[in-house]
Image (spheres, grey):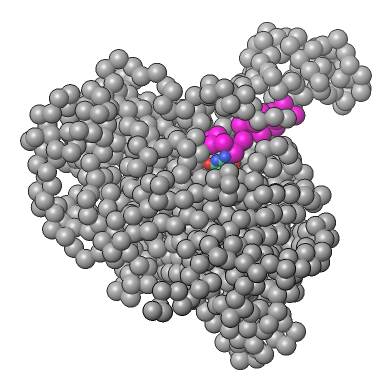
């Protein structure tokens, strides 16, 4: 089945926030933000700004009727700065005017006096002076101390990975207005409608029931709208409350890049030990997470780094410690993989480092240490239906790895200035919110009297195709044509208390709820059929292909007739179902449990060619064996693999966020922040759908697919490294991602510039 949005997307007919027609009297907002990364606000002067044409209102923290607080996990983040500013671009005031341009021009006339305070942008520096978001956490298995003592080989090193701009095509924004009696409606581009509702209510000082949050779809989120869609929506709500007029706030690209948080940069130390058979016996790792100026989702992201610090490998003795370091950058936030990729990069660096010292290919060490059935993760969960070795072997055989290796060796021996490199990247990613309580969902299904169906869930469509999957689930359970079904907007008045659409778990969580609601409705209809047709008890009844089947044969009762008759028999045709993932639990006091419903596995083989005169490179091919379980929609899932992979390659190669000493973002536009384009995507992507067992906790056995493929991109870093070493075997490139062409060039010619 094709993605149900595809047709409208390519015709430009899909509705995003900016396509919603505005009401008469709408005001437009412009956010005035901090011009320094750390300081004390001494004076704010609006006198000139207030008199600019079209300006209706300028509001600050002083105008907040409720709490000026939007911190989700820790209450440490004001909606609008109150006295102090902690990052460049921190919102201070909001200007409302008749047009957006008027609001923008007026904001330029705001005078601010700030006493500058010292700026920290480096997580290790923050750690040194004790600036932490929360106490450190440690995951441990076995005893690393005794294990290291018995190791044949021990290696140590450091690895760093950079941040990443989400670059959703649709920037952050919201449109809010008053309904009546002090209740509000807000349309917004968020992954977390309930977060907007909760913080909106707290800021306005009203009950959540007075705020209706409505989400049609997102032009991409990638984690950047899990928490960080909230402030803009709340500012629009506050503006509407203060002026009693509709307020639209839609960030311009440069404002969005400057003011919002990104993937967390990490700096990490590792120590890895092997026995004489090259089995990993011990691994110690310390992560310094650059959290930015407030907690946001950093504690949860940090936790997932620890969960995935051993990636797809079994290590019997592990000690992993993580510090969430408070710096003067915009609060960093969720980004596809949610800290997992940062953890995996370090173990892959440790293996590459060890392999270099041992004079062998990293793939030997990787393969030797892959997880198998019954192995224990450092957090206590035991592998079930472990596909790590199966995926590796499948990739090895299906893509003829020995032949690929030979081709590269021959190519490199025949070319002086072009060198190829290859790397394998196995992945293992846990599916579930790591906070167990968040793994719940609801669905509301209405069958209308004409037989058409409306489905509401907590799932937010952001391009990942979840609406298509919800529709497939409903059509499959009800046994009807998908054309009859409409997936409604995600709306807090229809489905309440939603978890954000995140953790790759949206289709599983909401799909299970849809399945339950539809099954209940179907049972009700079957009971009605039995009564209407006077069937003896236990007669097999089915609803399939829009028909009623009794004893395996169709009877003269279509779906439409059935529904109509049930309606006139006063049978409820609506159902609300609640799903909570069974079996999962986690105890943070001992850092042990069974936090994930299941794991997703896969292996990618990545090859690259480096131009050793220029430092530029191409990704030649990526060949993947991926564990989809039994895919509900191979088109949608393939799209997720391709998109995730390219986003991961971007993070590891081109995308470089640079801040200066003063905490100002230098790569603040698409002229300086490079993302993969059509020229830099892999020339070839092959995806093999493994015939794996799925999991009963995956919707119809179709495993979650949203985030895992991003981590295949990590292989691009190591493929580049291998190509560099083919040109200059003595090179020891730092484990510092992204490996931009500049870095490649300087690694190829380390003495460049140092000679007369
Ligand atoms: N795909 C598209 N096209 N756009 C997105 O914003 N977000 C990713 C992934 N794939 C995203 C995407 C992230 S970060 C997550 S957690 C999942 O989709 C969320 O959706 P799911 O739970 O339905 O997989
Ligand atoms: N993944 C993604 N988003 C989240 C998580 C998680 O584990 N926990 C809270 N938000
Ligand atoms: Mo995805 S980072 O869990 O929104």
Q: Is residue 641 above or below residue 595?
A: above
Q: In this orientation, does residue 714 appear?
A: no
**What residue lies at 43% left-to-right and 28% top-to-bottom?**
17
Report the magenta stretch's main SS.
Answer: helix
Image coords of residue 345 (percent x, y): 56, 66
Image coords of residue 650 (percent x, y): 54, 53
Corner quadrant of residue 725: bottom right
Corner quadrant of residue 266: bottom left
* Outermost residue to the front: 756
Viewer-nearest residue: 108 or 249? 108
Instruction: Report the side of 15 relative to 584 (left or right).
Output: left
Viewer-nearest residue: 528 or 224? 224
Give the residues in magenta: 458-477
Viewer-nearest residue: 442 or 138? 138
**What residue lies at 62% left-to-right and 78% top-to-bottom?**
729
Quadrant in which the C terminus is drawn? bottom left
């Amino acid at each position: 089945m094709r993605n149900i949005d595809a047709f409208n997307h390519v015709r430009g007919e899909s509705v995003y926030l900016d396509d919603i027609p505005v009401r008469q009297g709408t005001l437009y907002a412009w956010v005035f933000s901090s011009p320094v990364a750390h300081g004390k606000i001494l004076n704010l002067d609006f006198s000139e700004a207030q008199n600019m044409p079209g300006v209706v209102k300028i509001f600050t923290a002083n105008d907040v009727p409720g709490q000026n607080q939007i911190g989700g996990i820790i209450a440490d983040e004001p909606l609008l700065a109150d006295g102090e500013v902690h990052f460049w671009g921190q919102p201070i005031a909001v200007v409302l005017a008749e047009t957006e341009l008027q609001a923008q021009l007026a904001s330029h006339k705001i005078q601010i006096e700030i006493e500058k305070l010292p700026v920290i942008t480096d997580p290790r520096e923050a750690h040194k002076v004790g600036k932490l978001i929360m106490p450190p956490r440690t995951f441990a298995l076995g005893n690393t101390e005794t294990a290291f003592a018995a190791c044949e080989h021990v290696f140590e090193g450091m690895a760093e990975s950079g941040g990443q701009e989400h670059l959703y095509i649709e920037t952050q924004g919201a449109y809010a207005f008053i309904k009546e009696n002090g209740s509000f409606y807000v349309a917004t581009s968020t992954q977390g409608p309930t977060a907007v509702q909760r913080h909106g209510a707290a800021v306005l000082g009203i009950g959540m029931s007075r705020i209706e949050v409505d989400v049609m779809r997102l032009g991409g989120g990638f984690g950047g709208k899990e928490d960080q869609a909230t402030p803009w929506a709340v500012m629009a709500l506050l503006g509407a409350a203060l002026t009693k007029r509709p307020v639209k706030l839609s960030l311009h690209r440069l404002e969005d890049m400057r003011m919002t948080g990104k993937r967390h940069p990490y700096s990490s130390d590792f120590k890895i030990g092997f026995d004489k058979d090259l089995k990993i016996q011990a691994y110690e790792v310390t992560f310094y997470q650059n959290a930015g100026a407030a907690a946001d989702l950093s504690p949860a992201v940090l936790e997932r780094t620890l969960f995935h610090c051993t990636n797809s490998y079994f290590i019997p003795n592990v000690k992993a410690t993580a510090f969430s370091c408070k710096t003067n950058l915009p609060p960093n936030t969720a980004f596809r993989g949610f800290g997992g990729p940062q953890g995996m990069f370090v173990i892959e660096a440790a293996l590459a480092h060890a392999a270099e010292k041992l004079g062998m290919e990293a793939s030997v060490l990787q393969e030797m240490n892959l997880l198998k059935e019954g192995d224990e993760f450092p957090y206590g969960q035991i592998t079930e239906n472990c596909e790590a070795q199966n995926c590796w072997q499948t990739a090895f055989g299906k893509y003829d790895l020995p032949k690929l290796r030979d081709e590269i060796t021959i190519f490199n021996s025949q070319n002086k200035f072009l060198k190829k490199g290859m790397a394998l990247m196995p992945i293992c990613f846990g599916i579930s919110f790591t906070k167990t309580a968040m793994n719940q969902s609801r669905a509301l299904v209405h069958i209308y009297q004409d037989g058409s169906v409306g489905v509401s869930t907590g799932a937010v469509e952001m391009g990942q195709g979840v609406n298509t999957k919800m529709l497939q689930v409903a059509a499959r359970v009800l046994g009807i044509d998908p054309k009859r079904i409409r997936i409604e907007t995600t709306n807090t008045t229809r489905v309440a208390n939603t978890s954000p659409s995140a953790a790759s778990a949206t289709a599983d969580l909401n799909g299970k709820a849809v399945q339950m609601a539809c099954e209940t409705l179907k049972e009700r209809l079957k009971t009605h059929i039995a009564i209407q047709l006077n069937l003896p008890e236990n007669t097999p009844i089915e609803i399939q292909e829009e028909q009623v089947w009794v004893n395996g044969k169709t009877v003269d009762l279509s779906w439409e007739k059935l529904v109509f008759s049930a309606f006139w028999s006063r049978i409820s045709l609506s159902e609300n179902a609640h799903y909570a993932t069974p079996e999962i639990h986690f105890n943070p006091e001992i850092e042990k449990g069974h936090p994930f419903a299941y794991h997703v596995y896969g292996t990618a083989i990545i090859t690259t060619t480096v131009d050793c005169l220029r430092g530029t490179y191409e990704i030649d091919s990526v060949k993947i064996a991926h564990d989809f379980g039994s895919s509900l929609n191979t088109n949608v899932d393939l799209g997720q693999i391709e998109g995730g992979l390219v986003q991961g390659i971007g993070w590891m190669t081109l995308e470089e966020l640079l801040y200066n000493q003063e905490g100002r973002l230098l790569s603040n536009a698409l002229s300086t922040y490079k993302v993969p384009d059509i020229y830099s995507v892999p020339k070839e992507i092959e995806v093999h759908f493994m015939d794996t067992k799925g999991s009963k906790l995956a919707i119809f056995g179709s495993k979650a697919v949203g985030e895992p493929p991003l981590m295949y991109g990590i292989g691009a870093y190591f493929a580049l490294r291998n190509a560099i070493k083919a040109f200059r075997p003595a090179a020891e490139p730092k484990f510092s991602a992204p490996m931009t062409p500049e870095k490649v060039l300087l690694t190829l010619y380390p003495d460049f510039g140092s000679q007369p």
